[in-house]
Amino acid sequence: MGAVIVSRTFAVLAAAMAVTAVALIVLTPDSMTLIQGLAQLNPELPQHVRHAIQNVFGARVWAHVVTPVLVRPVWLIPVSLGLLCAGISASTGWPTGSPRSTRTRS
């Protein structure tokens, strides 16, 4: 029962991420990056994110992990998270054993 709930939860998250990605594709300019999207929400947000990540993880993580992600299209993050959620949903949703027979034997 618990695996079915987990599977359905991740299926709903995957669907929500797909809707979010399509909305971002339709409503934003073609060349908008994630850093530009963050700057549209709040002009100081990219600097706050940079300082927070550098303080917690260091400058190397900012330069080698976060910066390449921030120059990708804004819709790529929801698509990636949606695919991840869909994979988790598909791998946790079905029982691995054989189905039990409901017939009674005489």
Image (tube, helix red, strand yellow):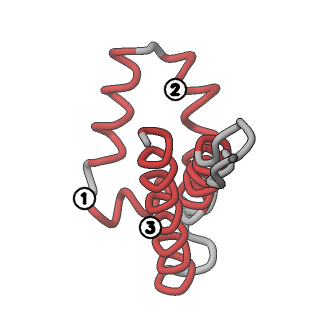
Instruction: Tell me the residue at 35%/15% (across/down).
Output: 56
Residue 95 horizontal side relative to residue 28, left or right: right
Q: Nearer the viewer, mark 2 or mark 3?
A: 3
Instruction: Tell me the residue at 69%/47% (across/down).
Output: 106
Q: Residue 16 got which mark?
A: 3
The amino acid type found where label 3 is placed reads: Ala
Which of pointers 1 and 2 lies earlier in the amino acid sequence? Answer: 1
| Residue 71 seen anywhere in this rendered image of the structure | no
Q: CA distance from mark 1 to mark 3?
A: 24 Å
Q: Position of residue 35 (x, y in %)?
A: 47, 53
Residue 81 horizontal side relative to residue 54, left or right: right
Q: What residue is disc 2 on?
A: 62
Viewer-side residue, 87 vs 48: 87
The amino acid type found where label 1 is placed reads: Asn
Secondary element under disc 1, as helix, strand or loop, is: loop
| Count of numbered labels shown in the rendering | 3
Q: What residue is disc 1 on?
A: 42
Quadrant in the picture for residue 38: bottom left
Q: Position of residue 34 (x, y in %)?
A: 50, 57
| Circle 3 Cα neighbour tier, 10 Å, few/some/many (<14 / 14–19 / ≥20) | some
CB under 8 Å between discs 2 and 3: no
Residue 53 horizontal side relative to residue 73, left or right: left
Viewer-side residue, 60 vs 96: 96
| Circle 1 Cα neighbour tier, 10 Å, few/some/many (<14 / 14–19 / ≥20) | few
Which of pointers 1 and 3 lies earlier in the amino acid sequence? Answer: 3
Viewer-side residue, 7 vs 64: 7
Secondary element under disc 2, as helix, strand or loop, is: helix
